[in-house]
Image (cartoon, rainbow, N blue to C red):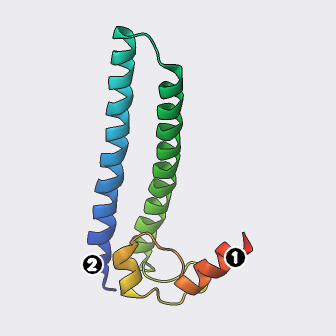
């Protein structure tokens, strides 16, 4: 994959992640404001909080992966496996711009976990 296309994909991922984090922040602010107006529904609040925490954790992992991808772009190694150095197919990067491994390596990694 050429560096220009890699930068475009990674920049789009940054916008997506930042938007999702902003949406979570907004949802938390709205929940706090509505909590002031209504008695709490503990079951709903716990479920919503768990969902938001899980979402935030996942987005923070994605943000860390994004920063690693940006570092690979700067180093000229974007599009290559961080494990083997083998090229990651363009189709995979189009679908998953933050991919760090080839499909085969990822499957092997997931099978070991």
x then y, percent, for residue 44: 48, 27
Q: Residue at x 47, y 57 (%)?
A: 62
Does 52 sit left or right of 23 as displayed? Answer: right
Q: Residue at x 47, y 73 (%)?
A: 99
Residue 74 image-quadrant placement: bottom left
Q: Which element is circle 1 on?
A: helix
Q: Residues within 10 Å of mark 1 (few under 14, many from 20)?
A: few
**Residue contact at pointers 2 and 1, CB within 8 angstroms:** no
Identify residue for label 2. Answer: 5
Q: Residues within 10 Å of mark 2 (few under 14, many from 20)?
A: few
| Residue closer to the observer: 8 or 90 | 90
x then y, percent, for residue 28: 39, 28
x then y, percent, for residue 19: 30, 47
Residue 111's disc is 1
x then y, percent, for residue 38: 37, 11
58 to 87, vertically: above or below? above
Q: Earlier in the sequence, mark 2 or mark 1?
A: 2
75 to 66, vertically: above or below? below
> Disc 2 vs disc 1: which is toward the camera?
1
Q: Which element is circle 2 on?
A: helix
Does 45 sit left or right of 18 as displayed? Answer: right
Name the quadrant of the C terminus: bottom right
Distance Cα–Cα, label 2 vs label 1: 31 Å
| Residue closer to the observer: 53 or 65 | 53
Residue 85 image-quadrant placement: bottom right
Does 12 sit left or right of 101 as displayed? Answer: left
């Amino acid at each position: 994959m050429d560096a220009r296309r890699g930068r475009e994909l990674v920049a789009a991922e940054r916008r997506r992640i930042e938007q999702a984090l902003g949406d979570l922040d907004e949802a938390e602010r709205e929940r706090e404001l509505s909590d002031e107006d209504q008695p709490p529904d503990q079951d709903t609040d716990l479920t919503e909080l768990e969902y938001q925490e899980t979402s935030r954790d996942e987005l923070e992992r994605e943000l860390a992966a994004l920063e690693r991808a940006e570092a690979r772009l700067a180093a000229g190694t974007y599009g290559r496996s961080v494990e083997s150095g083998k090229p990651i197919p363009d189709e995979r990067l189009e679908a998953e711009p933050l991919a760090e491994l080839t499909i085969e390596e990822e499957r092997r990694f997931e099978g070991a976990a």
